[in-house]
Image (cartoon, rainbow, N blue to C red):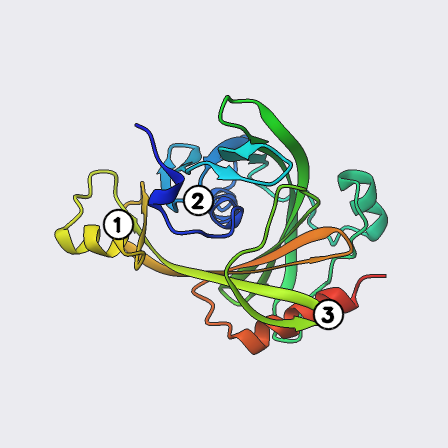
Amino acid sequence: MKFNKNDYPNSNEHFHQRLCEVLDSLPEGKESKTMKMSKTGKVALIAASLTVIIGASAFAGSGIVSYWTGSSNSGYDYKDIPSQENVMEDFGFNFNVVDGFSNGYKFDGAVKVDQNAVGEGGEVLENTDQLDCTYKKGDASISLFADTSTLSEHSGELIGEYKGTPVYYSSYTNKIVPPDYEMTPEDKAAEANGDLVFSWGSDEVNVQEVASASWSYNGINCSILMIDNGINNDEILQMVGEIIDNQN
């Protein structure tokens, strides 16, 4: 089946990949996994991997990215906050991980993600290591991602800036359904107009509000992934500011 990138609305190119990584890392005791992700937002939760059908995306001067792949351990690689020196040694970039946020989210653990940008012919255009940190507040959690991919570009709504750094926001409603789920006419219409994104492979139907904020600072791409958190824009900008202020 062939997918045309113009058939789908634009979104942050790593947005759905990062959702996949978060969902895929929840069960413990599995081996490392590799996921294919795309910008359509169609996420298949199949066996030990998550697969997304993504239309191709063009980046000036960098060729054409057809899809992204990422693999990581299912359990935390870092149960304690990695130091700035650890991040430089393990990831190759200078980033100081915050231990928590003023809104109550505290560091819970982190993993190293091996991600590839893959071209239309299956060639790897770029390989980067991505830092994925999880923060929790009670039963709620958020994920903070950092990498130095040169193929990333921000999209979504500009919600503000912090010390001259623009912050972008994207969101969608994700409907997770069983493999044998039959879409209703209302489902198909909602998917076609962008009101719903469907993910396949759960035991029961579940609807989630998924949001992501992204920015770049000192050559590092950062984003925060939020699922059913209800975090508003002012709170997001506060968190971004706390991350930026923690860099030195």
Residue indicated by mark 2: 39
Q: Is residue 227 left or right of residue 244?
A: left
Amino acid type, label 2: Lys
Q: Secondary structure at mark 2?
A: loop
Front position in the image: 228 or 77? 228
Q: CA distance from mark 2 to mark 1?
A: 24 Å
Discs 3/1, front: 3
Is 43 drawn above or below residue 229 in the view shown?
above
Residue indicated by mark 3: 164
Which mark is drawn over residue 204? 1
- Residue 9 position, x and y percent, is 38, 51
Q: Quadrant of the N terminus?
A: top left
Residue 30 visible: no
Q: Earlier in the sequence, mark 3 or mark 2?
A: 2
Label 3: how many residues lie within 10 Å, few (<14), some (14-19) or many (20+)?
A: few
Q: Earlier in the sequence, mark 3 or mark 1?
A: 3
Amino acid type, label 1: Glu
